[in-house]
């Protein structure tokens, strides 16, 4: 009778020990010791990505057919979605390596609104690898900016941290041509038409920005997730109409 209890107790002890060890490792090496998803201890090879090979394989890579302009899901036989056939967006192309689900969704949310702001390095790494694989060459990189209220609430500007790292990793010059002129928070839950109508005026060109850095150039615009595309479209419109960009390519970590 004593044995099962004993083994249960020792099992519990091992589990507690394991949890403490993981918590300790996580506190000391938050981004390279344990897998970001399953928290399993990583072997040397796996530390580069901070993910175990099993979790890396499970990432929600986009494999379905996508519109070749905006990246929206489409029927197999068409190259361009109905929306882009009706009216072309202001950006020239939008790319995203992942669908907005599973670990990628959790990662974006815990980066933006949780206590894991070290995740900017991993998000930048995914974007850098994907950008290099695309084989395109942009002249400068910028990001969808956040307003003062959001930056104060989070304690950092999420797209800025990612894009600064991305710029270092790719050697593409970072520029800051845009400002969030008024809050964009009331966009959630709105239909696409409503979003398009209310997005006007949310962003503006930064009056201190030197437009010679965008005029006639191909600009890469970074954001975390693309949903309706209204935000990316509005930023691209300003980059082209106000700041003379020749081409705007959108790169987001995920696409919903
Ligand atoms: Zn894992
Ligand atoms: Zn499209």
Image (cartoon, helix red, strand yellow):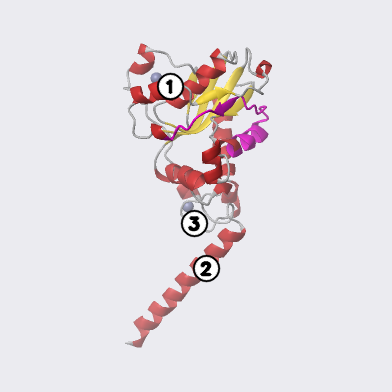
Residue closer to the observer: 232 or 17: 232
User: Which span is picked out in magenta?
Assistant: 161-185
Task: Specify the label residue 39 is tagged with.
Answer: 3
Disc 3 residue: CB within 8 Å of ligand 1: yes
Residue linked to disc 1: 70
Disc 1 residue: CB within 8 Å of ligand 2: yes
Image quarter of residue 12: bottom left
Across and down, in percent, residue 123 comes to: 54, 40
Image quarter of residue 143: top right
Q: Is residue 34 left or right of residue 215?
A: left
Which quarter shows the C terminus? Answer: top left
User: Which residue is painted at 65% across and 17% down in the image?
Assistant: 211
Residue linked to disc 2: 20
> Mark 1: few, some, or many residues within 10 Å (few <14, many ≥20)?
many
The earlier-in-sequence mark between 2 and 1 is 2
**What kind of element bears circle 3?**
loop
Say if mark 1 contacts mark 3, CB within 8 Å: no
The image quadrant where one finds ligand 2 is top left
Looking at the rendered image, the disc whose residue lies closer to the viewer, 1 or 3, is 1
Across and down, in percent, residue 85 comes to: 36, 13
Can residue 228 be seen at all in this image of the molecule? yes
The earlier-in-sequence mark between 1 and 3 is 3
Residue closer to the observer: 82 or 48: 82
User: Which residue is painted at 38% across and 26% down in the image?
Assistant: 195
Q: Is residue 32 left or right of residue 79?
A: right
């Amino acid at each position: 009778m004593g044995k099962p209890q004993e083994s249960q107790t020792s099992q519990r002890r091992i589990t507690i020990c394991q949890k403490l060890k993981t918590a300790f490792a996580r506190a000391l090496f938050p981004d390279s010791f344990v897998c970001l998803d399953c928290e399993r201890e990583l072997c040397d090879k796996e530390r580069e990505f901070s993910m175990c090979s099993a979790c890396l394989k499970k990432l929600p890579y986009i494999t379905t057919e996508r519109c070749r302009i905006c990246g929206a899901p489409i029927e197999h036989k068409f190259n361009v979605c109905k929306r882009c056939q009706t009216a072309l967006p202001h950006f020239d192309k939008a790319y995203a390596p992942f669908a907005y689900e599973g670990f990628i969704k959790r990662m974006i949310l815990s980066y933006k609104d949780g206590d894991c702001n070290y995740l900017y390095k991993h998000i930048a790494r995914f974007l850098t690898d994907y950008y290099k694989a695309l084989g395109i060459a942009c002249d400068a990189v910028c990001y969808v900016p956040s307003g003062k209220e959001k930056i104060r609430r989070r304690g950092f500007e999420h797209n800025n941290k990612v894009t600064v790292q991305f710029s270092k990793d790719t050697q593409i010059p970072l520029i800051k041509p845009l400002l969030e002129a008024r809050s964009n928070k009331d966009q959630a839950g709105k239909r696409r038409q409503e979003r398009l109508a209310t997005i006007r005026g949310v962003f503006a060109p930064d009056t201190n920005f030197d437009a010679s850095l965008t005029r006639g150039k191909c600009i890469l615009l970074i954001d975390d997730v693309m949903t309706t595309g209204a935000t990316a479209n509005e930023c691209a419109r300003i980059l082209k109409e106000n700041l003379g960009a020749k081409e705007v390519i959108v790169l987001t970590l995920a696409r919903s």
